[in-house]
Amino acid sequence: MHVMAADYTERRRDYDLLVIGSGPGGQKAAIAAAKLGRRVGIVERKAMVGGVCINTGTIPSKTLREAVLYLTGMNMRDLYGQNYRVKHDITVGDLLARTQHVIGREIEVIRSQLHRNGVDLVQGTASFQDEHTVVVRGEGERTVIADKFVIATGTHPARPETVAFDDLRILDSDGILNLSSIPRSLVVVGAGVIGIEYASMFAALGSRVTVVESRDRMLDFCDAEVVEALKFHLRDLSVTFRFGETVSSVEANESGTVTTLASGKRIPADTVVYSAGRQGATDDLDLEKAGLHADPRGRITVGPNYQTAVEHIYAVGDVIGFPALAATSMEQGRLAAYHACDEPANSLVSLQPIGIYTIPEISYCGQTEDELTESSIPYEVGISRYRELARGQIIGDSYGMLKLLVSTRTRRLLGVHVFGSQATELVHLGQAIMTCDGTVDHLVDTVFNYPTLSEAYKVAALDAVNKMRAVERFVV
């Protein structure tokens, strides 16, 4: 039963805004509201400050990736030969040493930011008692009353009931950090972002990786040509793809695992990692007591300003669904806090970049060729390949590429797609041009440092402009 507004107004308020969850979305919401002069609290379990992002997700996986790239010498093999390695016998300890260091530092940074901005850290697990009250259970129990709320509880890996996870040989994606040794062979179930990121890391380490995906393709929201380039590169690392296949059972014993597919195929491997979706972490919230409901995947539906069905309760980050990225969650948190505080805000969230930390990286901003074709928008493609750049030769990246999609009517950039070293960094130059409604001519006319990978923008821009000029000459 909800507490009526009259009852609420007579009670003491602990906070103007209470944020549930301290991941990227929760942090930015709390700090934004605090800087606007509001009394803010943030609820988080003692061992999870920074949320999944810091402890088991984004930061550990990306740090692990850097350790893999360095220790395997992957980026230098074009220069020093395919057998080049910085360390031949790489152990899990080698990989996790760097990871634990970064996690510890990041947690301290977050704690410092919250403290510096006067945000109270309320330790425990929150559940709603009514639409203005939560009970926080940790070492003790505390009732907290707030005017407004931001739910930023994130997600956890979905675990199919038919799979007997033992966290030793059959793991979810969070369990990667608990591996005792690097598996010689690995089955990855699910070719989403997380699954492909881990598949590429272990392939780089020398594991024989098999990816099983029920759909006919992977990363279908990305540029098809870029995805094909990634698949080619991963196959070169001995990754096997089983598209259009579903897992019917997984058996494990002391010597390894056998994954049986619905088609009858049986795949032996040391370890199986399930990365078949994530579930919104809303089970403990007692949402119905606040007048809210989650969908079967634990996600909360929100409106344009990240308001839920209860207007003073907001939700941001992975718990609201796609794109479920740390960067977008941060911006959602900021915008939700500004709206909750009646503060006007501008955002360029419609041109948010997507970054996928596979080996090699993928990143893009704007539309894909398929989207433009479906919308009947005429465009030209400009491509630059790293192997044609001096910097590409210097760093040993012969497979990278940058693709520009340019409107043939307005000459504006419609999409930027990058595959290869530093893709997640390079994409922002194109993003900046797009947010300013810049044209391909801005890139043609710009002088870039030499030798750099950024020079790829000028090469790709010239490629697009020359193609458009050839069409114009023909029309005339």
Image (cartoon, rainbow, N blue to C red):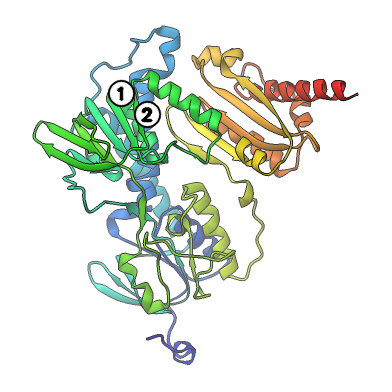
**Is 56 left or right of 315, judged from the image as shown?**
left
On the picture, is 420 further left or further right than 196?
Answer: right
**x then y, percent, for residue 239:** 34, 25
Query: Against 113, is 205 above or below?
Result: above
Locate residue 131, reporting x and y percent.
Answer: 42, 79
Q: Horizontal and vertical percent for residue 291? A: 42, 78
**Which quadrant would residue 123 be assigned to in this image?**
bottom left
- At x 36%, y 20%, the residue is 237
Is residue 33 visible in the rendered structure shown here?
yes
Q: Name the residue under label 1.
A: 205
Task: Residue at 30%, 23% (x, y): give it.
Answer: 205
| Relative vertical location of residue 130 with respect to residue 22 in this rendering, above or below | below
Q: Residue at x 45, y 87 (%)?
A: 8
Q: Measured along the vertical axis of the image, is residue 306 above or below residue 96?
A: below
Q: Tell me which amino acid carries mark 1.
A: Leu
Q: Which residue is tagged 2? A: 200
> What residue type is disc 2 on?
Ser
In depth, the one of 472 and 10 nearer the eye is 472
Q: How many marks?
A: 2
Q: Percent position (x, y) of residue 99?
A: 32, 36
Identify the image quadrant of the C terminus. Answer: top right
- Single out the residue that lies furthest toward the front: 263
- Quick one: 247 or 99, which is closer to the camera? 247
**Residue 35 seen:** no
Q: Residue furthest right?
A: 476
CB-based contact (under 8 Å), mark 2 and mark 1: no
Horizontally, residue 413 falls left or right of residue 360, namely right
Left or right of 94 in this view: 67: right
Frontmost of labels 2 and 1 is 2
* Relative to 109, residue 406 above or below: above
195 and 139: which is toward the camera = 195
Category of crowding for the residue at label 1, using alpha-carbon neighbours closer than 10 angstroms: few (below 14), some (14–19), many (at least 20):
many
